[in-house]
Image: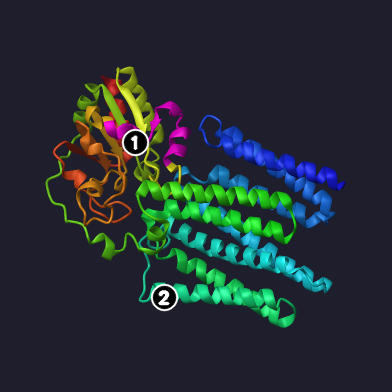
Amino acid sequence: MNPTLTNLAYIAAAILFIVGLKMLGRATTARRGNAVSSLGMLLAIVVTLLEQGMAYEWILVGAVLGSVVGGAAARLVKMTAMPEMVGLFNGFGGLASLLVGWAEYHRQAAQSVSALTATWVAVCLAVLIGGVTFTGSMVAYGKLAEKITGKPILFKNQHLANGALLLAVLAVAVLYVLFPAGALGYSLLMVLILLALVLGVLSVIPIGGADMPVVISLLNSYSGLAACAAGFVINNTVLVVAGALVGASGLILTNIMCKAMNRSLANVLFSGFGSAASAGGGAAYQGEARPISAEDAYLLLEAANSVVFVPGYGMAVAQAQHAVRELGQLLEANGAEVQYCIHPVAGRMPGHMNVLLAEANVPYEQLVEPQDVNPVMATVDIAIVIGANDVVNPAAREDQQSPLYGMPIINVDHARTCIVLKRSLNPGFAGVDNPLFFKENTRMLFGDAKATVSALVAEFKGA
């Protein structure tokens, strides 16, 4: 293929990536943005295959298998399992980059060509970042899917062990770049892969389940950086561009998530937040919860002029988003102003609640952020908390000993009435008790969120 045409196609693909990424910033254009970015990737793949003149038999087999798996995942995986799927995709992206680096090493060795030092550095980075991303994402998947405990897994001198492992990784990487040829180079590469895989596990196990949205963002960034390194390995411009875009956007999102929790990235990665030690620092809240029935909750809602829904992971588990949307429509028809306030770290991945509400066709204009609602929360008649816990915990404002202290929350306790939909009074994913349940203006509506909201809908329709 003509090099000029190849470069022009790569530029076009890069433009499609950037335009698609920009369109993903709004719910109204996100679907088209996804299609535009996919078109850019298709163009990049086709041009690369034509340029390289590869044997297409195995490529077609891989494309068919990948399409079947991807299509089945998109159709069959429930929205509640979307964070786990994102974690798996991040991991497989890292594994693909690792394999590209490994394959390039064997290609150079088979050709007996002395590659440039920059090539070995790129191979080293692809293998290292890809390995950390793969096993780290597998651990994140295990925590999200509750295959392993969501609490931090800590052991004595853990930071020292991780530090020593990181130094070992750097030392082996330097030796590999200096001596890449022969049996020694291959042995060093294998050791580097092994250390990267172990480092990925040890980097994520100390992180609690409550911090998973940040971890997912960070691992997404890692997968992009690994792809960028793989692009340098095979000298592919469009892969470098795509990897850099994913890496940069992932880091930006990670920073946004950390700010939403008023914590540094170092605190997220190394504090062991959610462990028994950290969670035990807050007060033991006591009081009498005030249960309410669906019939009584209906009477409150029927008289309300303004209602704010605050969704959380409990809504995802119950798959209650469509029932919530229907209740919102009935409240609007009854004359109430309805909004949906979403905390940046609600759910188990970035944008989890936004995706669920978009699936239920909740108007984008009704989605608001905490800083938009908190100043006027005292004028809100009813705040309905659906499965959220940590992001509405007043201890973040009131208890300096609480692990959540300083985290910006949604001030639902300032509303005239707060109705909390939960199965029990158990703490949230962070393992921190919530004094909201015992506030004077709080009413607890116990039960499955979907069944409870459906009961409220039935009350409105039967009135």
- Whether tag 2 and tag 1 are in contact, CB under 8 A, the answer is no
Disc 2 residue type? Leu
Q: Who is closer to the viewer here, 277 or 180?
A: 180
Up-down relation of residue 450 to residue 428 (above or below): above
Position in image of residue 243 (x %, y %): 63, 52
Please provide the residue range marked out in magenta: 353-375
Q: Which mark is residue 280?
A: none
Element at badge 1? helix
| Residue 33 percent location from the top left of the image | 60, 35
- Within the magenta stretch, is there residue 32? no
Query: Sequence order check: which comes first, mark 2 or mark 1?
Result: 2
Q: Quadrant of the C terminus?
A: top left
Can residue 64 be seen here? The reply is no
The main secondary structure of the magenta stretch is: helix
Give the residue displayed 51% in from the left and 69% down from the top.
199
Residue under the point 74% across and 54% down: 236
State which quadrant residue 270 falls in: bottom left
**Which residue of the protein is positioned furthest toward the right in this rendering?**
2
Distance, label 2 to label 1, CA atoms, is 39 Å
Q: Is residue 179 left or right of residue 248?
A: right
Q: Is residue 360 visible?
A: yes
Outermost residue on the bottom side: it is 184
Q: Position of residue 361 (x, y in %)?
A: 46, 29
Residue at which label 2 appears: 160
Residue type for callout 1:
Gln
Q: Residue at x 53, y 50 (%)?
A: 250
